[in-house]
Amino acid sequence: MQTTHPFDDDKLREECGVFGVWGADGASSVVALGLHALQHRGQEAAGIVSHDGHNFHAHRAMGHVAGNFDRDDIIRKLSGSAAIGHVRYSTTGETALRNVQPLFADLATGGFAVAHNGNLSNALTVRDKLIERGSIFQSTSDTEVIIHLVATSTKPTAVKRLKKALKKVEGAYSLVCLLPDGLIACRDPLGVRPLVMGKYNDAYVFASESVAFDVIGADYIRDVEPGELIVVNDDGLQSFHPFEEQRPRPCIFEHVYFSRPDSIIEGTSVYHTRKAIGAELAREAPVEADLVVPVPDSGVPAAIGYSQAADIPFELGIIRSHYVGRTFIQPSDGVRHLGVKLKHNANSALIKGKRIVLIDDSIVRGTTSLKIVQMMRDAGAAEVHMRIASPPTRHSCFYGVDTPRREKLLAAQMDVEAMAKHIHADSLAFISLEGLYNALGDHRDAAHPQRCDACFSGDYPTSLTDRDREEPEQLDLVDAD
Ligand code: SF4
């Protein structure tokens, strides 16, 4: 039986990463390197579409970027000075090759390839209408809705068609699209998912995260603005704002967990933000303890911030093996429980007899927290106090992040005291939503939140047309604080 490792299993999972370049020799190699740096945003499949001035070329495959795009024969086939790419973790549409992006179609305006990070919250409803009118869908991906809306538009150019199409969808989208004569980068009006722009020699590059620019030696210029649509072609760059202006609501969880700590979002270092979150958590939820221990790797920056603010030594009390892949084969039920220690092991010499503050970024189902607390106790910890660098996750995400249904979220089922008992911790505390905003240098405006924080607050920034038609009665389990 193949399974995801237990420590990675109990996380919200980022959906996808996109990368695009216009005007660089060997564009597909540049995209492949960029996708390597975005691999944490999707490990199930990867794809690149290039254009050589005459023809489009595509390669899509299940699995990681390495192994699929480190082959000369494949990169040579993807010729041209323009290319876009995508890494994918399935959020909508089954995991199948036909759903692997970039998607491509020949339209009346010419070839059109699109790579999408996010999720359209009315995709099923729009899809049904398109099918009624004769559209034939090739995939089950929500992104294909955009292609059909562009295909059926009567506007004269692909750019005009895309602008019109995007006015018919709701939800989250950061897109890079490749046309025969240009590249389009676009972010939804709320800017829910990130998208940044850079310069690679004379070429423009776009990526989900700035870390992809570091890998290729490109300079980060700025974030693509919420609601901005940028067209790059041989004449240069044009910026449009085709949507009615709205107050942006970028995803707050990018700062907590999804993005790599060496990325810059909204001009701010993710690493520094995570340390600030840890420091705020120490002020909100202090505890008498001997050591601060991060749950590796994502809990590390917040644990450093907690340790410095609380003046409690930081130690690596859990050691992660870097020689175990994200998935592994568990040979039989009898040894399945041993799998936890394959990738993470308690540093017993350090832990024994100590009062430990364990720092993690989030609790989703609670299965991981239970195992880690037990691991600390088995290693001889005198006390185990868990501190979480995000508020309780009580609501599902509909914007391109894989979350369990609400009834599976531990914080939707019980209050914090009951959660502490459930994971066998001596104490448990989460940073407050206000504290999280403070760490980001904001004060949360409860009437008009500056960010999407719906998985904590239930305050979704868009309508959820598909969800509401499927689940008109929402579960109301535990009230938000
Ligand atoms: Fe991000 Fe949560 Fe909003 Fe989803 S619901 S976009 S994970 S803040």
Image (cartoon, grey):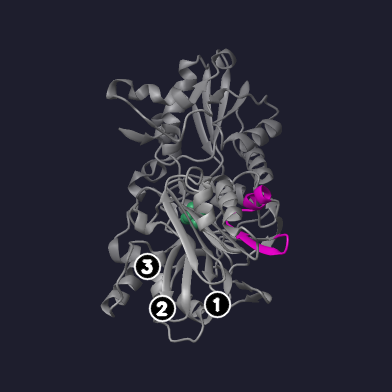
**Between tags 3 and 2, which lies in front?**
2
C-alpha gap between disc 2 and disc 1: 20 Å
Secondary element at image label 1: loop
* Location of residue 241 (image quadrant): bottom right
C-alpha gap between disc 3 and disc 2: 16 Å
Q: Is residue 408 above or below residue 421?
A: below
Amino acid at dot 2 = Ala
Q: Nearer the viewer, residue 76 or 92?
A: 76
Q: Is residue 125 above or below residue 336?
A: below
* Residue 151: image tag: 2
Can you give x and y, in whole percent of width and height, for residue 311 in the image?
Answer: 70, 28
Q: Is residue 122 visible?
A: no
Amino acid at dot 1 = Phe
Question: For residue 319: magenta?
Answer: no
Q: Earlier in the sequence, mark 2 or mark 1?
A: 2
Residue name at image x 42 percent, y 26 percent: 340
Q: Earlier in the sequence, mark 3 or mark 1?
A: 3
Instruction: Kindly check if marks 3 and 2 are in contact, taking CB atoms under 8 A apart as contact.
Output: no
Q: Residues within 10 Å of mark 3 (few under 14, many from 20)?
A: many
Residue name at image x 47 percent, y 48 percent: 42
Q: Residues within 10 Å of mark 2 (few under 14, many from 20)?
A: many
* Location of residue 431 (image quadrant): top right
Q: Is residue 24 visible?
A: yes
* Residue 123: image tag: 3
Can you give x and y, in whole percent of width and height, for residue 210 in the image?
Answer: 64, 53
Mark 1 highlights which residue?
A: 243
Magenta range: 200-216
Residue name at image x 35 percent, y 51 percent: 95
Q: Is residue 316 above or below residue 256?
A: above
Q: Nearer the viewer, residue 266 or 431?
A: 266
